[in-house]
Image (cartoon, rainbow, N blue to C red):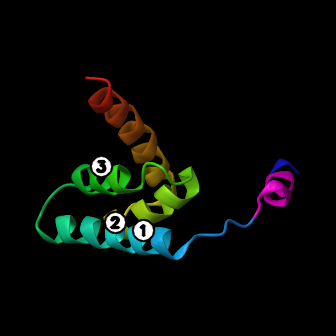
């Protein structure tokens, strides 16, 4: 029952053309890092840095596509990247 309520509360998000390009670039950057043999953490952090102003769902979706993560794994990486990024910014 709770899942149905959450789905009903979700609203569609309108993404501008500039944001769409930024998302595509972040995904491509993550895929390139994976292709170079970097870790999923490195790829996810690069995606997070590029998209940190975007909504959580957008960043998580980009991590799924760009770093090859599962939905649950991507959410975990999002939380970890958010904490790591906050420490980098507050130095």
Cα distance between the residues tagged 2 and 3 = 10 Å
Give coordinates of residue 81: x percent, y percent. Answer: 36, 41
Q: Quadrant of residue 57?
A: bottom right
Q: Which residue is mark 2?
A: 26
Labels 2 & 1 near each other (Cβ < 8 A): yes
Cα distance between the residues tagged 2 and 1 = 5 Å
For residue 36, above or below residue 59 = below
Q: Which residue is mark 1?
A: 23
Question: Is residue 8 highlighted in magenta?
Answer: yes
**Residue 45: which numbered mark, if any?**
3
Q: Secondary structure at mark 3?
A: helix
Give coordinates of residue 88: x percent, y percent. Answer: 27, 31
Residue situated in front as seen by the camera: 89 or 66? 89
Give coordinates of residue 51: x percent, y percent. Answer: 41, 55
Say which residue appears at 77% left-offset and 62% top-offset: 11
Magenta-drawn segment: 4-11
Sequence-wise, which precedes: disc 2 or disc 3? Answer: 2
Sequence-wise, which precedes: disc 3 or disc 1? Answer: 1
For residue 79, above or below residue 60 = above
Of the 4 image quadrants, the one containing the C terminus is top left
């Amino acid at each position: 029952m709770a899942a149905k309520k959450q789905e009903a509360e979700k609203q569609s998000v309108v993404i501008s053309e500039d944001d769409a390009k930024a998302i595509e670039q972040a995904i491509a950057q993550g895929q390139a890092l994976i292709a170079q043999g970097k870790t999923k953490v490195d790829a996810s952090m690069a995606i997070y840095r590029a998209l940190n102003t975007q909504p959580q769902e957008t960043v998580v979706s980009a991590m799924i596509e760009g770093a090859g993560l599962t939905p649950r794994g991507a959410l975990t990486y999002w939380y970890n990247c958010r904490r790591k990024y906050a420490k980098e910014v507050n130095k």
